[in-house]
Image: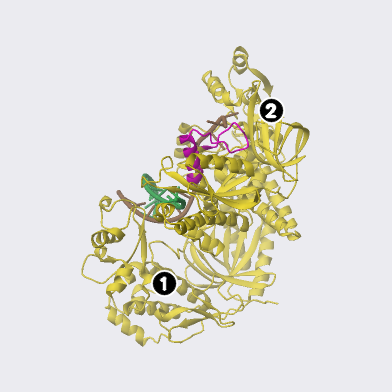
Chain colours: A yellow, B green, C brown
Amino acid sequence: MEIQILDVDYTMVDNKPIVRFFGRNKEGESVCCFYSGPLPYFYAGGKDAEDILKKEGFVYEKSGMKVAINPDAPLSLFRVWLNDPSKTPDIRDKLKSLGLDVYEADIPFKNRVMCDLDFSGMGWLDVQGNIINTESVSASRSVQAKEIKRTEKDENAQFKMLAMDIETLMDSGKMDMKSNTIIIVSFVFSHPYNGKRSMVLSTRNGDGVNYYENEKAMLEGVKNIINGFDPDFITGYNINAFDLPSIIARMEKYKLRPVFGRCRQKRAFVKKVSAREKVYVPGRVVIDAYEIVKKDFSMPRYDLGVVCETLLQKGKTNVKHSEIGTFYHGTKEQFGRLVEYAANDSALVMEIIERLHLMDKYIALAKISGTLLQDVLNSGETARIENLLLREFNKHGYILPCKASDREMTKREAEREGKLVGGYVIEPDKGIHSNVAVFDFKSMYPSIIETYNICPTTLVQSGNSGDVIKTPSGAMFYKKSVREGIVPKIVSNLMKERGVARKRLKSAKTPEKVRALDAEQWALKIMSNAFYGHLGYVRARIYNMDTANAVTSCGRELIKKTVEYVGKKYGYKIVYGDTDSLMVKIENGSLDEIYEIGNKIAEDVTKQLEGSLELKFEKIFKRFLPLTKKRYAAWSFDKMEAGWKDRIETKGIETVRRDWCKLVSETVGAVLEILLKGGNIKEAENHFKGVLEGLVNGKIPIQKLEITKSMTKQTKGYKGMQPHIELAKKIQKRSPSEAPKIGDRIRYVIVKGTDLLCKRAEDPAFVLEKGLKIDPKYYIDNQLLPPLERLFTSIGVSKSELLGNGKQRGLLEILNSIKESQTTLRAADVTGFVCSGCGKFFQKVPLSGCCECGAGFVFSSQGGMAREIETSAISQKQ
DNA sequence: GCTACTCGGGG
DNA sequence: GTGTACGAGTAGC
């Protein structure tokens, strides 16, 4: 039988562990595979190690393994065998107290087994054995395995997913998961369950509701339905920190065992992981859609409402939080709306995960790193890297040390302080540059690790001067011919496999295959890029400053030498570069000509490089505007199969910030667009002046002036004066019922007046209602000017030029000077952009810079004035 | 400018 | 469960 691994655990029978592999087979049945044989063990060494082990009565054997971080140390090592994994910590501590050094004595048994058998999370197994009958697990099939081996398969089994959402009564007024009553539980099934795709359970009866007499009975129902449907994945929104912990807490209150995993004995449990809670359900995988969305997408907020609008382009049925209690006790219709709301939330979460295929990446990471899917989701990069390190080091005769103690970590932090040197950043040549070729070193750090054989196992520890590679940081590494490093070997394999995956991707036929291969190549890149960081990470088992610094020192030297080479041989100026990238000013030539030159340079440079190092020509910045190190904007052109594709690219320039009003991000965006695409500084200046005029004339819609800040504590708790807090106080006095509460976001605008600035914050609705005037000076000085002044000074336009000629002039004068300066259009009048080709209306210019039809844009203004700003149909579309 | 602390999502 | 493991954004210096 072939099964795909979802989860692994063990049970003790006759004082020996039996490993259980939970998964699903090709036929779609859930399977539990029992396997005896693997025993826990770790390594011990040190003075008199053997005597001590013998005297203490341990089962042990001499081991020829070497310690990864110090392979040349003469050390007699022993493998110590145990029976019960749960007793390992005690035994480990005992041996330590007897003066022994221990290694790999902190590896969870399931990981130990997965590593030793070379199995992966979400990987496939070929299992030979007998079907058995057992009540200990809930699975369609249980197998007593005689032989198991891994097998390779791209596709996934038909996994079942359950999406759920609960509604509770917050009678205490607090989010207390122990005391709040659960009134509704909604389920959506990926596959029909008892002929249904969804269910709503409630302690109140209603249309289409599974009614339960009380909460306890409903929670019994929850257990029965989950176990009956037998999902592989349980998903929900913030399910790790709310829904499941609530369910578990309430079950415990009623003395119901929270057993809805695939082991009939083991409870689902909540584990605190660095202040966040994670829920584990044996044999199943808990997927918190909130956590995934937060990792995968960048949004200002992550409540399910905005997430659905952004990702699914649809809103969610909404019931105000304060209405939940009222509707539960309210009319039939009201209760119906509540039921609908709960059902909808589950359905939306299921849709987010399935339609956007959010699991693809995590499944690929599990397969590649060997980590169980649940651990890929719940832990970070470190867990994946160390899983991979463990199996690869072991395969090649090396063992890893235990994790560093707190004391050791503090020591490392102190040692690392200021000594871990990063990449080389070239001081940017300020101004607007035209036709800049962008190069970068392909997978720079992984390639350096591979090429220079950088690894803890190859680091020359003492003055051994043999056949070694000397890095610019001074650290020396044995050449591959002497001893190949394990980290270089892993990284090299990952990069090689990525090449294979990408090749296969090109010829992939089905969408499933394309997705899986794309996720695979992505995960391979992520993994190979993570090793450098790991070497310098204080918690890493293979932490070593000398190796980490060696990597970056090679990078710095590479980029410096390349700058020199390109400058000397070709006479081009390098206007900017950061760590692994180079911006080379070509200045003259068409896109196609620069493309030719770029590729020639890349090829030439690559020829001079050692090993797998490669310089790649990436793209062209038709215009490049560097502001400072790490901050620039560019009009970038990529050569695609269909022709050149352009876009505005910014790095480190915040276009959206919560403490800026919309007008700022819009103006920054528009000015950049004009500068980059039009290349006309005067025009950009005029645009800015137009915005100022709009402000002075009160022509800017108030929504664009709103600033949002959140109130994190009681108003009294704030020492200094802050506008949003002062506003909160005002509203408290005016209409206490609408007063902002802790955690609320407060929107405000600054109005004209003689009061202190902080006292002039006002509610936008109040401003409209009372016809108050906003304060243009505030918006100019505190909002627009800081980012825009920086932008303009970088291209040689001073503040005084921006605001007029002389020193600080009155706003009226600014206004007059604007009128004289022949602005063709006042920004305040611009309501959007209209495509000059197809006429489609856009509120904002899309990131591509042009409409889908390929044509450029014209401003659309209230007065019907229109001016073409861009006709960038550069593409050679066929 | 940098570092320390907080809070996210959920009813 | 042989594990302790975030991270962006803001407040405060």
Residue A52: image location, x then y, percent: 59, 15
Question: Which residue, as the protein is rendered here, is positioned at the far left?
Answer: A754
Residues A477 and A226: in front is A226
Chain under numbered label 2: A
Which comes before the other along the chain, label 2 or label 1? 2
Magenta span includes A642: no
Q: Nearer the viewer, residue A532 or C12?
A: C12
| Residue A247 inside the magenta-drawn segment | yes
| Disc 1 target residue | A792
Give the residue type at disc 2.
Pro
Query: In the figure, residue A518 lies in which quadrant?
Result: bottom right
- Taking A343 as reference, is A60 above or below it? above
x, y (%) of residue A842? 52, 76
Looking at the rendering, the stretch of residues picked out in magenta corresponds to: A241-269
Query: Which three-letter amino acid code belongs to the residue tagged 1?
Result: Phe
Taking depth in this image into account, of A873 and A330 the one nearest to the observer is A330
Q: Is residue A317 visible?
A: yes
- What residue sits right under mark 2 in the picture? A38
Tell me what residue is drawn at x 65 percent, y 29 percent: A66
Q: Secondary structure at mark 2?
A: loop
Q: Residue at x 46, y 87 (%)?
A: A864
In the depicted structure, whether residue A364 falls above or below residue A46: below
- Whole-percent x and y of residue A276? 47, 43
